[in-house]
Image: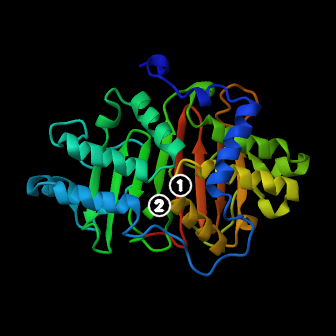
Amino acid sequence: MSDNQYPICPECDDVSRRDFVKVAGRAAIVAGVLPLFATPRSALSAPTSKSKAETTVKRLYDVLSDDQKKAVCMPYDHEKRKTLNPNWLITPQKLGSDFYTDEQRKIIDTVVRDVSSEDGYERFKRQMAADRPGGFGDYSIAIFGVPGSGQFEWVLTGRHLTLRADGDSVKNMAFGGPVVYGHGASDPAKNLFHFHTKAADAVFKAMDTKQREKALLPKAPPEGRVPIRGKDARFPGVAVSELSADQKELVETTIKIMLSQYRQQDVDEVIAVLKAGGGLEQLHMAFYEQGDLKSDNVWDIWRVEGPTFVWHFRGAPHVHTYINIGLEQPT
């Protein structure tokens, strides 16, 4: 199936420097209220059971029939809640099937909107339309536990996307657990998330020779290997603590751009978890020579990792991104 068969966001087509600055400006608005290099806070910000997405999940749960609940609702500790995969259906009932009513589909779409920023919602919907013939209708959901009970989680999965809403049922764990985003367009100029690589590349381009030698590695780890490893681990790439003030500002901008598709409450929790792990100073950035799509030394596979933060961006042959951010590995 051709990558050009579906409409692609014009913002993302061959992002120019001017476009990059505009995206950075939007990201600064999303996350700029919490300077990432500030002193770690003692209390973590997070969504609650009364947050917009979580109350929408409760509304969905209340309109599901008993037969529907048997099919898509599971115990909170079910193994499927912990599964991380860039291309799977968490339940076989697709959103576009007769299993759901039009009202229920609208509510599910509202949950997707509620866990996303305005730009993120539009980007995720375009990605779904591009990556599956049925778009949103080819994805599926599950609900673990009972919404509003204090221990529940809603999960959407499908090709290149995992979204979660948990009302902070998983304590000190951003997004309620590991999440995925991506896009199947193999041409970076047409990929909805290549602007993330543009941001990371700005950091690499600003490094001196010695910093680049530390940051650039020949081969990336397996894309789905994103455990939270804690403060005693050794991380690949160059330490952000070794960068200049100007370079650190570019790292901060990149992190904000990476987070810009998610709702503010999840961004707040990411930043709080990051600070609790020592802040950006404890992160490392690694770029990988493998998978350089255009042989242009814009490294399409890169990783940002620290004691509480793992973000693996695999941009070749197309984007798969794995995110795992928390104070400890969830069980």
Q: Residue 297 at what x, y percent from top left?
A: 76, 33
| Crowdedness near tag 1: few (<14), some (14–19) or many (≥20) residues, C-alpha within 10 Å | many
Q: Residue at x 39, y 41 (%)?
A: 87
Determine if residue 327 is in view: yes
Q: Residue at x 15, y 42 (%)?
A: 99
N-terminal of the two: label 2 or label 1? Answer: 2
* Mark 2–mark 1 CB contact (< 8 Å): yes
- Name which residue type carries label 1: Ile
Q: Residue 105 at what x, y percent from top left?
A: 26, 43
Per the model, the C-alpha gap separating discs 2 and 1 is 9 Å
Disc 2 designates what residue?
175
Q: Residue at x 48, y 21 (%)?
A: 3
The image quarter containing residue 313 is top right
In this rendering, the answer to whether 36 lies above or below 295 is below
Q: Secondary structure at mark 1?
A: strand
Image quarter where the C terminus lies is: bottom left
- Name which residue type carries label 2: Phe
Disc 1 designates what residue?
323
Q: Secondary structure at mark 2?
A: helix
Of circles 2 and 1, which is in front? 2
The image quarter containing residue 74 is bottom left
In depth, the one of 147 and 90 nearer the eye is 147
Image quarter where the N terminus lies is: top left
